[in-house]
Amino acid sequence: MRQRPLKPPNPARQRALPLPLPHKTRLPVGPAPKQHVRLAARAALSSRASFSDQVRKNPEFLLGIAREIAGLPPEHGVSTVLNRWARFLRKGSLSLTIRELGHMGLPERALQTLCWAQRQKAVPLFPDDRVLASTIEVLARFGQLKVESALEQCVPTASRAVLEAMVSGFMRAGKVGLARKLLELARIHNRTLHPSIYVKLMLEATRTPEGYGLASALVDELGERSDLELRPQDCTAVMKVCVKLRRYAAVESLLSWFRESGGSPTLVMYTTVIHSRCRDGMHREALSLVWEMEQAGCLLDLPAYRVIIKLCVALRDPERALRYLSRMKEAGFVPTGDMYNDLIEGYAAEGRLAKCRQLIREAESVGLKLDRRLLARLSETGDAHSC
């Protein structure tokens, strides 16, 4: 019997390998240790907590809440917005929201936000001095803080943050007298407020000549404090107030105190003290401070150049003043009309009328307006010389 020849296998129709069985390929899984479960749960909780911390401290989020509250219809309360975000808020979170509502001119909404925070029980948001202080400052600024008649009862028990907020609110409302009364009551009850509050009240008082007496008294009170701590900008602000009050010795005392405290004078502080010495007639001492400032590597700004040019003219050295003017132009600053007025007066005092005319043409070519009385005086002097 004949056998049939075997056909060669077709490679395209080869049998596929069997799929692996799960029970043979997977390793046996045992119960997870309790320590791993605890760590995983703790990591989840910490990630949730860190997210909440990031949200409650995020200014954009807190300002966004204020904008949502501002957009509510008058008949809707702030709880419409705040209830949605309550789980993300913590103590102190709403202080920025309340201040923003004050900037928007919405003191009623700020007070409603405080009342909402007081009612929260699940996540306690009150008592909190930051939220209370922000609300008090907003209400005082808009004249809605009805405690003027009860200041004596408030001062002994209120916290420092609340007292400072009341003073700031009264100042921003223009009630300098009430702010002063509150500071006086705080001093009587041995309540120490931050020196920056005194500085702000000084600056507010010196806006008009009627407040110079109050500002001078505040300078004396600051000088009597043994625990005086002033930031460089606050120290410079007090110096400027003293210059306006013509208390030049106080400026020198502040400079000495600041150096003894380990501080390095800033450019603005140097400029203020130079201006004070010029006003006091101490021109040589002012020039030595200019040299010290340049040795310290301070980059001069426009007010510094203005004061130095005025100083050089007072020293009858217009050439030095002109060099500073050239340096100022090279630094990219544009000279002002009062700088040219000072330079022209300096050269006129030396009888150098040709230089005066050159400076006049230079100033007028860039569109600066010069002092008419100075120009009239120079014209008369030129006519007299020509005669």
Image (cartoon, rainbow, N blue to C red):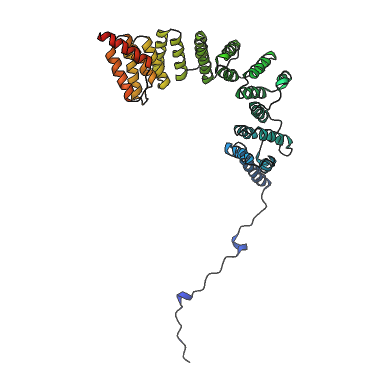
In the image, 307: left or right of 179?
left
Relative height, residue 142 to residue 371 (above, below): below
Question: Looking at the rendering, which quadrant does residue 220 occupy?
Answer: top right
In the image, 187: left or right of 330?
right
Answer whether residue 53 is visible to the viewer in this image: no
Residue visible at 69% across and 33% down in the picture: 111
Relative height, residue 56 to residue 154 (above, below): below
Q: Nearer the viewer, residue 83 or 174?
A: 174
- The percent coordinates of residue 133 (x first, y second) are 66, 27
> Which residue is most to the left?
386
- The percent coordinates of residue 378 (x first, y second) are 32, 13
Residue visible at 31% across and 24% down in the picture: 365
Question: How many dots with numbers?
Answer: 0
Relative height, residue 386 to residue 148 (above, below): above
> Which residue is most to the bottom?
1
Quarter of the rendering occupied by the C terminus = top left
Answer whether residue 232 is visible to the viewer in this image: yes
- The percent coordinates of residue 65 (x first, y second) are 62, 39
Q: Nearer the viewer, residue 163 or 125?
A: 163
Relative height, residue 312 to residue 44 (above, below): above
Q: Nearer the viewer, residue 28 or 309?
A: 309
- The percent coordinates of residue 272 (x first, y second) are 46, 16
